[in-house]
Structure formats: C-alpha cells, structure tokens
Image (cartoon, rainbow, N blue to C red):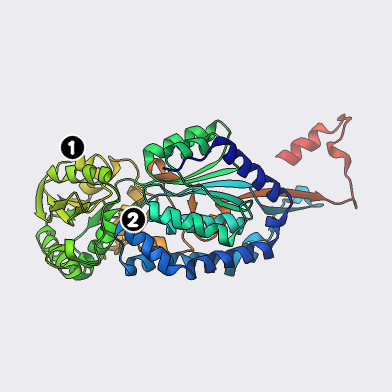
Amino acid sequence: MITVETSKIQEIIQQQRKFFQNGQTKDINFRLEQLKKLKQLVTENTQAITKALKADLNKSEFETYATEIGVTKEIDYAIKNLRTWSKPKKAPVSLDFFSYSARIYPEPLGVVLIISPWNYPFGLIISPLVGAIAAGNCAIVKPSELAPHTSSFFAETVSKYFPTEYITVLEGGVETSQELLTQKFDHIFFTGGTSIGKVVMEAAAKHLTPVTLELGGKSPCIVDTDINLEHTARRITWGKFINSGQTCIAPDYLLVNQKIKKDLIAALQKKLKEFYGDNPAESPDYGRIISHKHFERVAKLLNNGEIIVGGETNSTEKYIAPTLLDHVSLTDPVMQEEIFGPILPVIEYTDIQDAIAIINSQPKPLALYLFSQDKALQKRVLQETSSGGVCINDTMMQVGVSSLPFGGVGDSGIGSYHGQASFDTFSHYKSVLKNSFWIDINWRYAPYKDKLSLIKRIIK
C-alpha cells in the first residue's frame, strides 16, 4: 500500500497555494479551458476507465457509461453556465441606503481536498472536481484504496492533463487520508460512510475548515396501492441492484402496503429473472462486492428474516445474489445499519402513518422513494418526513438532474453539490457595499446632540 510522506503532502499544498495566489484560476477562460480538459480526460480514456471498473467492481460496460462516464453531463452543464454563475449579483438596498449599491461576488476558496469513495470510484471523483475547477480552486484528490485499479488509473492519467500545482491525485490507504486531514485546507469534500464522516469533520474543526459530507443511510422506499405494478417493480429492481446494491441512494428497504405486498414480491422476482437470468452469478450485467471485508459484513445480514429469493454467496468471487427478505424485524441487524449491498428487506404496513413513523424513527436518510399516484399521499409524505432528497415513482434518477442540488441532511450529510450547487459549495460569496461621494448626510456622525429622535425614527 502506498503511503505518502508528510513532507511530500506539505510540499504539494505549498505548491498549490503558490499557484492559486498567482490569480490564474480566477480567470473564467482558464476555468473553462480546464473543464474542457477534464472532459477530454474522460472521453479519451473510456476503455481504460471501463477496464479499471471491471477489475474493481465487475461493472458492465453499460453500467460504467451510465453511472460513471455519464458524469460528463456535469462538465457540459458547468461549461454552459459558468459565466452566469460567476457574475457578481446585484443585491437590493433599502431607501435608508439610497446612495449605496450592493453586489455579491463569488470567489474561489483556495486549495481544496476531495476524498472519494469506492462504490463509484471514478464518477464520484469527477463530479465534485467539476465544482472545484468551475469555482476556481486548486485541488488535491484522494481516491479510495479499495478500488485500486481505478485509483491507479486516475493518478497516472490526471498528471498528463493537469500540472501538479493545480490538481494532484494522492494515492494511499488510511494513513495517507489521516495525514491529509492533519493539514490545513480551504474546504474538504468527503463522500463515504457516516462514521468516517465524523472523523473528517472532527479533523476539519481543528483548522476551522468548512466541510461537505456526502454520506448515506437507510433510504426507505414506500410502495402504495395506487401504482403501475410493472413499472414500479422494474424501477425498484434497477435502483436497488445496480452496482450490486453498493449505492448510497439505493432503496435500502421497502415499506409496502399490505394489500399489494404479494403482487409486488412476485413482480420483483420476475424482474430479477428478466434482468439477471436464473443464475445472476453468470450474468455479465451483475457486479461484485468491493472487498472480502465488505462481503463478510453483507453476507451476515442474510441471516435476518426469511429469504424469498436469492441468498446465494461465493466468497472467492465476492458474489452475493440479489436477495429479497421477508419477515424482517426493525430490531434485526439488517435494519440497524445501511445495507450497502444486494439485499432488500420487505416490510408491510396497513396505514401510511405506520410507514411514516418507521421512517421518522430512523436517522434522516439521503433519499426517500415513494411509489404512488395519489397526490394527497405524495404531499403528506413530503410534509411529514425529512430526507436529503425525494424521488417519486422512480429510484436513483434524481442524481442525474444537474439543476437539483444533491446532498444529505442530519446523519446523511452536510452540504450539497451538482450543477450550480457544486459551484456554490466551492465558492465564497463576498458581499460588497459601495457608497458614492455625491452626498454625505451627517446624521450618523458625532456629536449626537439632538439626533436621538432622528435615529429612533430611522430604526422604527
């Protein structure tokens, strides 16, 4: 395992601070040029990206394009809108300030740290990096050591497109991450689990460094009776089992109306067979668990409840079949942690209030899904629950809409990104107030004799 020495990390940070201070990254044309280079990096290396992701997660070429290479849409969106985002915005002033003008200027933060996860080890590097570049920052990227092929590819490739003093990739294990977190950055962007998110936030607090934490949690999926059963089953199956369930916004468990539970389970079984065949282990479209450690953790959860379909495992191949669980208790381990694997518990409810109560008894999730055509029910769920985001009558697709900020709330994260939200995350909005010289009323200057009644009238 690669370990980067403290002196090397400090040297790179110093180089990046020097580069940032020369002002080049503040130039909009420079930023646009770098965004185009980032897209070039992706488009010129699609075969290598596909090969790396196949080696790390057994991702099919289709999944790689759909969930990793497809991040180029974020780059295009930033290129299209950057000039608008970066313009100073006029702010209104009250009549009391009639001789003033006010504007808000977005400015880059400086040198930022991006710590990426292993489940989408390419796309979840590129996406925040788009925001860092667009906002005019220098960046150090720490890929996940659990996806070594993708990490190695990215480290080797970035240096061919960007100078080290602008964008650097530092590989390594936990020790490298720990050393990076002892350094002073202007922003830290972390994607990963809640427990490590707390470590990142604690380390950042020592330097008063702002953080964006993209975490996860148990994202519930409510299924009402007023649905298209075929579409519902297909969308849930896709959202849950893509990337072998290793997605932070995958439906973590189903809350199904008792009246439709039997039909939904049958439909889900049918879709699993359509997607992955009789033996998903032989399907070219079904992935693998990232590591043996994670395999062992997820496999233990199969001991909860009753297996409806699936349940097969192969530790050598880190394979866990797509699995549906019934008769799961809320106190079972599978309902006490984010599953982050291809296991889907099915819990029935008779009244929507019961489903809402279950959701509200858990930490706030990153995503909430609701399948229902009942607009009153949709409104009620939106009003009575809290989550990072909501997707109605589909799963996962909210992450692909650049105009929607993506992020968590509570235990599922702090801050958001995608589209302009990414630009905002990596920017400081500087307030600027400007007065003129054409008039200078003396009501605010000492001596204050005979001015008290005037200030009272102004404040009133």
Return the x and y of residue 319 as percentages of the image width and height. Answer: 20, 54
**Residue drawn at 45 percent across, 36 percent down:** 175
- Between 81 and 409, the one nearer to me in the picture: 81
Is any atom of residue 246 visible in this view?
yes
Q: Which mark is residue 278?
A: none
The residue at which mark 2 appears reads as 56
Left or right side of 428 for 143 = left
Residue type, mark 1 in image: Thr
Q: Is residue 358 left or right of residue 191?
A: left
In the rendered image, which quarter contains the N terminus? top left
Q: Is residue 433 left or right of residue 80?
A: right
Whether residue 220 is situated above or below residue 277 in the rendered picture: above
What quarter of the picture does the C terminus occupy?
A: top right
**Residue 304 seen in the current view:** no
Residue drawn at 76 percent across, 47 percent down: 96
Total numbered labels placed on residues in the image = 2
Of labels 2 and 1, earlier in sequence is 2
Determine which quarter of the picture holds residue 34.
bottom right
Q: CA distance from mark 2 to mark 1?
A: 33 Å
The residue carrying mark 1 is: 331
Percent coordinates x, y for residue 252 in the rendering: 26, 51
Which residue sits furthest front?
Answer: 1
Mark 1 nearby-residue class (10 Å; few <14, some 14–19, many ≥20): few
Which tag is nearer the camera, tag 2 or tag 1? 2
Tell me where residue 5 appears, x and y as whole percent: 53, 37
In terms of image quadrants, where is residue 242? bottom left
